[in-house]
Image (cartoon, grey):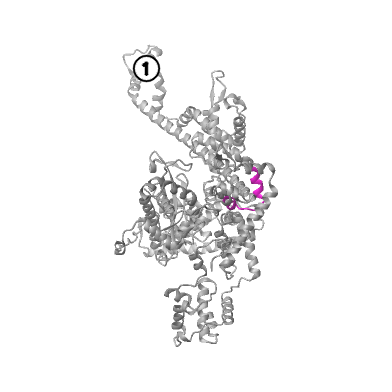
């Protein structure tokens, strides 16, 4: 039967078959799923006829595999029936097994449900599922996300999933219901002025639509680029203020707001105008809200980057000045020696006036060199700080031009302890926003309480008019404010209220209103470790960690761990860990027999097998005048994937350049590339061969960044002499499982890879779910072990310096207990701290799970903040426990070390493969 075109297309045919199709068992699968427990055997023995008993075992095995029931013909299940007969009823022939009547089949299903404590999804359960889908739609209206959450809910509630068409309709109702709810709320809240501003975004000024002009991002940190970004901020601010108030009343998650905002760049102006007016306004409002926050992120990022650059320049200048001073002082040592010789020269009479001797000394060494050479001889350290602040004076023209407009545009806020700095920030911003130059204001009126004592000598100097009274140097004062704001932003002590990346950490958490129903929220997340009492979790950790310390040291002492080399004795004992290399696979002759084919032929073959080309849908769902030739889409994929570009592809392929440009604009979007890649990944993962690449019977993934030089200016690109010479580039951070890239993200080379580990793992939209994940040292931080364990991932990094990591192990027993142990904890776990901060930790973990904030942002803040608050310390302590458990396993288990290396090698192999294709 043809699919109903009115229903959402959520899963591919293969994905639907994987969920609802008859199980296709291998012989190993049959051994596993048709194995009967004593209770199950008793139920089978209670069946009156052999034919019914065979079908009961069959239904039982199928239910174990897929948690649902099937109606089938004999021809479709012959192999499984024969296995059951051979195993349990060897005296019976297949011919004697007849199909069951419907009442008998349904009766057996009731027994199976009882054995597994499952229920059918009746009307009441479906109503509960509907309400669950509606709540999930507030988090994200992406259909595949709602479907997955619905299936997860059914599994948690031990309910048999209803048919796919019901779930399609359920998701469709949830999506349309959520949009209808939001548009109705918006229509009631809109003011005439905001309505006019939203509608004006779709109008054109001098041939350019306003929304497209405002959509443009700064390409670099150049002055004009950032100046235009400041202007875009001013244009969006009124809409943002309204959106900020409105969205707080809707219960929408940040992820949903982000999703609605992302639809504006995807759709053409034509399609936005053709939509229902209320829907278009909702999308535009979310876009204005999201873009305003993004602009503030860009401006804050630019501010931090530019201050960094000025600091580096000043440090380099001071370093050069110190070297030059040393060189000059050493050059004049000979002259200094001649000056000293004057005091012992017998030819100079004792009664000669000192003025005459000093004149001779100045002839030998210039007066201005005396202090420099004297400091060198007295081994006085060069004053680098004074040199740095002197250099800031020379940079004043540059930082005034490049930093003032950013500083004046941003809205900073701080905590009580930062009041002195905030007083200076408010004062300086008021001057700049009113157009007054700080140098034209009386320095005595400037707030100075925030200036550190160590820096006052550089900022206050004597003047000719008042030699005994020191005056504030306004230019240096201005830069000090910029520098301290920069430091406070990175430490989390100051924040930008209307930003996404730099807002207050508390704003990233689940709202107070939603957190009032804490128990319901925790049940909804469904993470067992979050709902269990923390005392029970710590008790389990204590038992596991105590046993592990004993077993690891026992294996070392007994010699069972043959890879530990010990030198010295007593307190001077030292150890090193030797890791044997992983076995290199032999070159199989199978690959040498494969014919060489063109990449186009390969892509056509893969498209036929996986259907990934169907994911490249036109940006217009309807009213498309003509369908693009699939050859154009494939040509665009190859052109961009190999970095050749559309012009070169047009030259070598015979396809017209205009047709390639049209195909790229209409079909290649982040949205379609994402789902096409998911289709490929899922198709590969469905192959029986995919799990043959498991490492130690686990789906063991890895992630790593690859530096890529950018050919065009982007705000995320950074200079890196090591990787790009004088050019700029980005890092492509990719998650690879069994040689398949399942998720990726472009990040700046200045961003820490560890902030994105959980984000990539948890938010993958493929069906591939890694069990263990590895990174190099760059993927580790103070919270990743705990976060990944909380969400059922095993974190297995490779450390550059394992010995150093063992110096910070933690344990539950006093250090005296490990006095004679080679591997021992450095201190005890702070259990009371963890218990007291557990409610706050629960809220942070729920916020991560509920997509109230981008996970990478929260992980970055948890790691980067310098303020050592109790919650952060408690999180780090939980992470220390998990890290200690892993480190002990890593020392004790050579197979684990080999597995980690093997997983990382696969990621590096993918990088080599991609570089070979793309360059």
The percent position of residue 463, horizontal first and vertical second, equals 54, 20
Q: Residue furthest front?
A: 625
Q: Is residue 828 visible?
A: no
Q: Residues within 10 Å of mark 1 (few under 14, many from 20)?
A: many
The secondary structure type at the circle numbered 1 is helix
Q: Is residue 242 magenta?
A: yes
Residue with the mark numbered 1? 361
The magenta segment is: 241-258
Left or right: 660 with respect to 187? Answer: left
Report the front residue among 185 and 13.
13
Q: Is residue 903 magenta?
A: no
Left or right: 311 with respect to 871? Answer: left
The percent position of residue 458, horizontal first and vertical second, equals 51, 28
Report the front residue among 3 and 90.
3
Q: Quadrant of residue 806?
A: bottom left
Please name the predominant secondary structure of the magenta segment in the image: helix
Q: Quadrant of residue 527?
A: bottom right
The percent position of residue 378, horizontal first and vertical second, equals 40, 28
Q: Is residue 456 above or below residue 183?
A: above
Q: Quadrant of the N terminus?
A: bottom right
Q: Is residue 61 above or below residue 181?
A: below
Q: Residue at x 51, y 34 (%)?
A: 224
The percent position of residue 808, horizontal first and vertical second, equals 47, 53
Report the front residue among 231 and 755.
231
Q: Is residue 464 visible?
A: yes
């Amino acid at each position: 039967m043809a699919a109903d075109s009115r229903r959402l297309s959520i899963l591919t045919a293969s994905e639907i078959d994987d969920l609802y199709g008859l199980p296709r068992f291998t012989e190993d699968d049959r051994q596993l799923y048709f194995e009967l427990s004593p209770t199950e055997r008793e139920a089978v023995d209670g069946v009156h006829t052999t034919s019914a008993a065979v079908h009961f075992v069959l239904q039982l095995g199928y239910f174990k595999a897929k948690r649902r029931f099937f109606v089938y013909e004999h021809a479709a299940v012959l192999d499984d029936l024969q296995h059951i007969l051979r195993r349990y009823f060897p005296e019976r022939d297949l011919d004697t097994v007849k199909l069951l009547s419907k009442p008998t089949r349904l009766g057996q299903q009731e027994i199976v449900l009882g054995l597994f404590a499952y229920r059918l999804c009746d009307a009441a359960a479906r109503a509960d599922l509907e309400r669950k889908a509606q709540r999930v739609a507030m988090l994200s209206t992406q259909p595949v996300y709602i479907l997955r959450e619905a299936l997860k809910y059914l599994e948690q509630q031990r309910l048999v999933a209803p048919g796919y068409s019901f779930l399609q309709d359920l998701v469709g109702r949830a999506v349309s219901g959520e949009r209808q709810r939001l548009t109705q709320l918006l229509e009631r809240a809109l003011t005439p002025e905001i309505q006019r501003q939203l509608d004006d975004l779709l109008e054109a000024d001098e041939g350019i639509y306003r929304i497209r002009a405002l959509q443009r991002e700064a390409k670099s940190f150049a002055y004009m680029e950032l100046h235009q970004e400041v202007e875009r901020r001013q244009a969006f601010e009124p809409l943002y203020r309204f959106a900020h108030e409105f969205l707080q009343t809707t219960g929408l998650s940040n992820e949903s707001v982000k999703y609605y905002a992302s639809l504006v760049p995807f759709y053409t102006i034509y399609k936005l105008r053709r939509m229902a007016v209320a829907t278009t306004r909702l999308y535009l409002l979310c876009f204005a809200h999201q873009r305003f926050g993004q602009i503030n992120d860009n401006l804050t990022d630019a501010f931090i980057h530019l201050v960094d650059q000025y600091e580096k320049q000043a440090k380099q200048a001071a370093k050069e000045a110190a070297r030059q001073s040393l060189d000059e002082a050493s050059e004049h040592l000979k002259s200094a020696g001649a000056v000293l010789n004057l005091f012992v020269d017998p030819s100079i009479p004792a009664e000669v006036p000192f003025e005459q001797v000093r004149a001779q000394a100045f002839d030998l060494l210039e007066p201005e060199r005396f202090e420099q050479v004297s400091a060198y001889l007295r081994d006085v350290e060069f004053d680098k700080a004074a040199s740095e602040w002197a250099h800031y004076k020379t940079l004043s023209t540059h930082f005034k031009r490049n930093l003032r407009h950013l500083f004046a545009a941003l809205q900073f806020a701080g905590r009580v302890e930062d009041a002195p700095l905030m007083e200076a920030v408010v004062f300086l911003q008021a001057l700049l926003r009113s157009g007054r130059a700080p140098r034209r204001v009386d320095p005595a009126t400037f707030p100075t309480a925030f200036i550190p004592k160590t820096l006052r000598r550089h900022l206050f100097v004597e003047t000719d008019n008042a030699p005994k009274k020191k005056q504030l140097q306004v230019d240096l004062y201005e830069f000090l404010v910029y520098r301290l704001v920069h430091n406070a932003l990175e430490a989390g002590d100051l924040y930008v209220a209307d930003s996404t990346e730099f807002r207050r950490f508390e704003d990233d958490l689940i709202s107070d209103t939603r957190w009032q129903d804490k128990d319901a929220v925790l049940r909804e997340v469904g993470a067992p470790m979050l709902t269990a009492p923390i005392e029970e979790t710590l008790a389990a950790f204590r038992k596991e960690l105590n046993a592990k310390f004993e077993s690891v040291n026992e294996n070392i002492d007994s010699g069972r761990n043959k890879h530990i080399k010990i030198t010295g004795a007593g307190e001077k004992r030292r150890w090193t860990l030797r890791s044997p290399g992983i076995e290199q696979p032999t070159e199989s002759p199978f690959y040498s027999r494969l014919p060489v084919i063109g990449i186009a032929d390969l892509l056509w073959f893969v498209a036929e097998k996986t259907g990934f080309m169907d994911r490249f849908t036109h940006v217009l769902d309807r009213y498309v005048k003509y369908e693009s030739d699939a050859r154009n889409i494939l040509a665009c994929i190859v052109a961009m994937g190999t970095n050749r570009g559309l012009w070169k592809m047009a030259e070598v392929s015979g396809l017209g350049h205009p047709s390639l440009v049209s195909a790229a604009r209409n079909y290649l979007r982040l949205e379609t590339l994402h789902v096409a890649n998911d289709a490929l990944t899922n198709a590969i993962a469905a192959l029986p061969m995919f799990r043959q690449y498991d490492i130690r019977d686990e789906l063991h993934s890895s992630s790593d960044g690859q530096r890529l030089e950018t050919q065009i200016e982007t705000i995320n690109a950074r200079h890196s002499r090591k990787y790009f010479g004088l050019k700029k580039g980005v890092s492509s951070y990719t998650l690879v499982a069994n040689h398949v890239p399942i998720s990726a993200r472009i990040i700046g080379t200045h961003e820490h890879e560890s902030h994105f580990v959980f984000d990539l793992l948890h938010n993958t939209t493929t069906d591939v779910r890694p069990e263990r994940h590895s990174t190099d040292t760059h993927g580790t931080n103070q919270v990743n072990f705990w976060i990944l364990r909380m969400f059922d991932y095993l974190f297995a990094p490779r450390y550059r310096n394992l010995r150093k990591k063992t110096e910070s192990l933690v344990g539950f027993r006093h250090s005296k207990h490990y006095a004679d142990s080679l591997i021992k904890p450095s201190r005890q776990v702070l259990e009371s701290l963890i218990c007291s901060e557990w409610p706050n930790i629960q809220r942070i973990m729920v916020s991560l799970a509920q997509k109230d904030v981008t996970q990478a942002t929260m992980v970055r803040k948890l790691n980067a903040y310098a303020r050592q608050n109790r919650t952060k310390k408690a999180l780090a302590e939980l992470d220390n426990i998990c890290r200690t458990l892993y480190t002990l396993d890593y020392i004790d288990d050579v197979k684990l070390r080999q597995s980690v290396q093997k997983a990382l090698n696969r990621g590096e192999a993918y990088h080599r493969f991609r570089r070979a294709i793309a360059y």
